[in-house]
Image: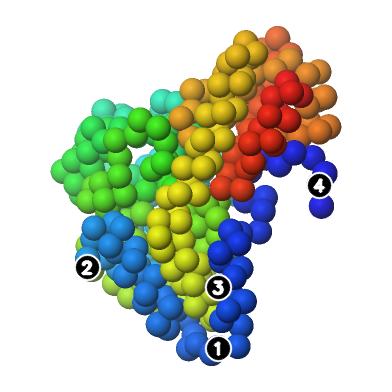
Amino acid sequence: MSSKLPFASDYMHLCHPAILERMAATADTSNIGYGCDAICARAKEKIRQACRAPEAEIHFLIGGTQTNVVAIDAMIPPYQGVLAAETAHINVHESGAVESSGHKVLTLPSHDGKVWASDVEHFLAAFYADETWEHMVEPGMLYITHPTELGTLYTLEELTRLSEVCHDNHLWLYLDGARLGYGLAATGTDVTLADVARLCDAFYIGGTKVGALMGEAVVFPRPGVVKRFFTQIKRHNSLLAKGWTLGLQFDTLFTDNLYFDISRHAIRMAERLKDGVRGKGIELYADSPTNQQFIILPEAKAAALAEKVDCEVWARLDGGRLAIRLVTSWHTREEEVDQLLALL
């Protein structure tokens, strides 16, 4: 176990204690498998209520990369690809997992991690203006993340515009919500979970990074988008036999607003960190309102920090400087933030 301050990611701790308590309480009970149990059914209904999508189809998977691969492969045919920002997780940090399923990632410019609707329109116009487009990988989906890889957020206007462009051009809009809780809890955001459900064709609610032991909840707000998604999960070797262990975690997270309360805690800790960094005159690499904060340090200072803090080098800049990512979570404590600031 590391003795360093834990700021490398938001999944450095096991899970919220309430989930462990629920697991212990059900240790001697039996449940049918594959997510077809009463616990999963109860969790799904709570998620539908939170999304204000009473007919939503919901499935539980284990991790984010697995979820992206299964959802994308199920939603678009083999001859189509997926549009995404050049900085998108599926393009950079998923080892070609989506492309290994046969779907090329078609990159768009990244604007602080975000995709602009105008860039989607320009891509589509240029694609179909090419007389040889039938020899090329046709875009069938737009993939976005909220928050983005840089911790930035879409506004409601931006998300609405992307939804309009996608639907006008027969593209699915899919939102990777690995850190969705932290995005929804960010100060000043005007995007709600109900907005995400209303504007996206599919998205997932991240649990692994927001208090769960593991697990992501895939939501299709309008049923029928994908036929036999359950079977397609199994086809991808991704169906957990003890599915109730995932349902139990989401049932716990979506009881008494726990998911949103622990997300807000992470944001408070990030804001405490950000205010402290600014007070020390340290430059920010990105102006993130979420739980990922990016600071710029001289290489020697960054190396000294890494001896006492688990953190990640995000980018190498000119002049011997490094952009360092520091991540708060549901578990972060005020004293840990203060100790980090003292080291800076």
Q: Can residue 123 be seen in this view?
A: no
Q: Which of marks 1 and 4 is nearer the N terminus?
A: 4
Q: Distance between the residues labelled 2 and 3?
A: 27 Å
* Few, some or many residues within 10 Å of mark 2 (<14, 14–19, 20+): few
Residue 10 spot, x, y in % from top left: 60, 46
* Closer-to-camera residue (125/84): 84
Q: Mark 2 points at which residue?
A: 55
Q: How far apart are marks 4 and 2 (CA)?
A: 45 Å
The amino acid type found where label 4 is placed reads Ser
Q: Is residue 19 above or below residue 312?
A: below
Q: Mark 1: which secondary structure?
A: loop
The kind of residue on which mark 3 rests is: Arg
| Residue 307, quarter of the rendered image | top right
Q: Quadrant of the C terminus?
A: top right
Q: Residue at x 18, y 41 (%)?
A: 164
Q: Are marks 2 and 3 in contact (CB under 8 Å)?
A: no
Q: Name the residue under label 1.
A: 29
Name the residue carrying label 4: 2
Residue 310's place in the image compared with 319, above or below, is below
Residue beneath label 3, please? 22
Q: What residue type is labelled 1?
A: Thr
* Quadrant housing residue 341: top right
- Which residue is pictured at 67% across the width and 53% down the height? 13
Q: Can residue 296 be seen in this view?
A: yes
Q: Is residue 24 left or right of residue 130?
A: right
Q: Residue at x 29, y 35 (%)?
A: 190
Q: Is residue 66 above or below residue 165?
A: below
